[in-house]
Amino acid sequence: MSTWEIRHVNHASPESDKQETLRIWDEKGGLYADLTRQRLQAQFAQERFGMAVAFDKGKCVSTTAYILSPRGQGILTQVYTVPAYRGQGIGKATVAETIQILRALEGRAIYLAAWQDWIRNIYQKAGFEFIGAMGNRHAFKLTLDPSGDDSTLFRKNQQTAIRPLAKDDQADLSALFNAKHNNIIKHYELSCFLGSHFEAEFFKLQKHKGHTAWVLDGTETIQGFATIMPSHNRHETHCGTVDLLIHTNQTAQAEALLDALETTSDSEVLYTYIASNENSKRSFFLKAGYQKIAHLKKRLSIGTAHYDLDLYEKQRH
């Protein structure tokens, strides 16, 4: 029987704890290996990152990580237990410890995504509520404080400002993407659609060279997000795909957000995808000078649902 203990690990922890934690994520490889290494080297602006790590005689056997924005939006991620140590409640313990850490740091809400029923059951027993799904990818939210409720985070008439995307915006973007929307397409280029959580997509965005990204920043959290992703196809130089997601309470700011985005982009031809029943989005882009150039049958699939998309184009020069 193992004898394990949980330690808090972040960029300021002893190097031995950080390297042992990195070991299992390096072995797993992929996106989170790079994420963990970056965030254990130094703090990202005002964002806080840390992990509840279970050690057995100095060996890392389980982790749960968190990301917390300056305004208290949190992401729970990197929940993993080494196979030989599963079934002992270690994963549940690191999840519970991480939630307590975020409470102590005055987090307002926590967001996460899960693909399997048994994992979803763990989160639901910890108090997380199901808020949406994109196929098997289910999104959950745990409201830690009344100020983390959507009615406060996205309340009308809060002060807003338009600014470029910042390095520590990830958790606030998760709050926006997990809020209730009528949008089928949340971000076409990042494959983030109706019901989907926003986490790994943030890092995919960072690796997309030449993108332009702006946010509508509110008093409580980010209220809108807009990008132009340039085409890397050599036959499509100076073309870019526009994505714009704005909370329904802040749609009056959509035109200014799109204008800031387009003004700072070098793309000469802009495209955007709109689902056939997204009428308000269609009206907005038509007013902004976009014209329909194609109808794409069953272009988007979310689980068993299929959606037709219309492709719109704007020539800028």
Image (cartoon, rainbow, N blue to C red):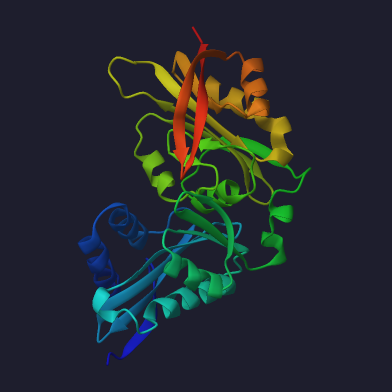
Q: Position of residue 254 (x, y in %)?
A: 66, 30
Q: Seen in the image, is 241 located left or right of residue 2?
A: right
The correct choice, above or below, for 54 with respect to 45 in the image is below
Answer whether residue 204 is visible to the viewer in this image.
yes
Tell which of 286 and 29 is nearer to you.
Answer: 286
- Which quadrant holds residue 105? bottom right
Residue most extreme to the top: 317
Residue most extreme to the front: 304
Total numbered labels: 0
Tell which of 48 and 195 is nearer to you.
Answer: 195
Residue most extreme to the left: 27
The correct choice, above or below, for 162 with respect to 269 in the image is below
Residue at horizontal 47%, vertical 53%?
A: 45
Q: Position of residue 59 (x, y in %)?
A: 24, 80
- Position of the N terminus, as image quadrant, is bottom left
Q: Position of residue 58 (x, y in %)?
A: 25, 83
Tell which of 34 and 236 is nearer to you.
Answer: 236
Residue most extreme to the right: 157
Residue at horizontal 51%, vertical 27%?
A: 308
Residue at horizontal 67%, vertical 21%?
A: 283
Residue at horizontal 70%, vertical 33%?
A: 251
Q: Seen in the image, is 178 located left or right of residue 114?
A: right
The correct choice, above or below, for 13 with respect to 160 in the image is below
Answer whether residue 14 is visible to the viewer in this image.
no
Q: Position of residue 13 (x, y in %)?
A: 35, 73
The correct choice, above or below, for 67 with respect to 286 in the image is below
